[in-house]
Amino acid sequence: MDEFTEKYLKEWGFENLINRFKEEEIDRIAFLDLTESMVARLIPKMGPQANFLKLQSMLKEEIQRDKVGYLFIILSINS
């Protein structure tokens, strides 16, 4: 597990899952690519599963917006 994964688990209130994510060797790439079925195996209760998936989706959207914004800035500077 990397710092990115641990940071978001703590920030989202899933500190209790840090060891589980370490055992499964979940890094940033795996963290962002976890599917619903994978999350269901990692997080046994449905409420926390739903919360995790919602936060994961929001994080992926934020990362995508940042990439688009960064690309726009680079293209603006180069034109």
Image: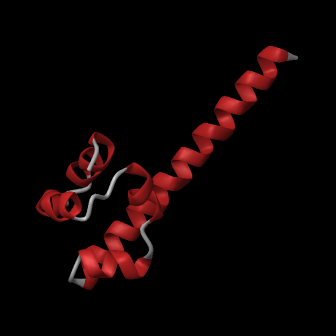
Task: Name which residue lies at 17% across and 65% down.
Answer: 20
Spot occupied by residue 7 in the image (x, y as percentages of width and height): 26, 44
Spot occupied by residue 51 in the image (x, y as percentages of width and height): 32, 70
Spot occupied by residue 19 in the image (x, y as percentages of width and height): 13, 59
Picture mark count: 0
Q: Is residue 23 left or right of residue 36?
A: left
Quarter of the view holding residue 24: bottom left
Task: Name which residue lies at 40% across and 69% down.
Answer: 53
Task: Name which residue lies at 33% across and 75% down.
Answer: 39
Task: Name which residue lies at 31% across and 81% down.
Answer: 40
Q: Nearer the viewer, residue 69 or 25?
A: 25
Q: Is residue 31 above or below residue 42?
A: above
Q: Is residue 66 above or below residue 52?
A: above
Q: Is residue 64 left or right of residue 7?
A: right
Quarter of the view holding residue 3: top left
Q: Is residue 9 above or below residue 4?
A: below
Quarter of the view holding residue 4: top left
Q: What sort of colour scheme is used for the picture?
A: secondary structure
Q: Nearer the viewer, residue 36 or 59?
A: 36
Q: Is residue 50 above or below residue 25?
A: below
Spot occupied by residue 64 in the image (x, y as percentages of width and height): 60, 47
Q: Nearer the viewer, residue 62 or 74?
A: 74
Q: Is residue 36 left or right of residue 76?
A: left
The residue at the far right in this view is 79
Placement of the C terminus among the 4 image quadrants: top right
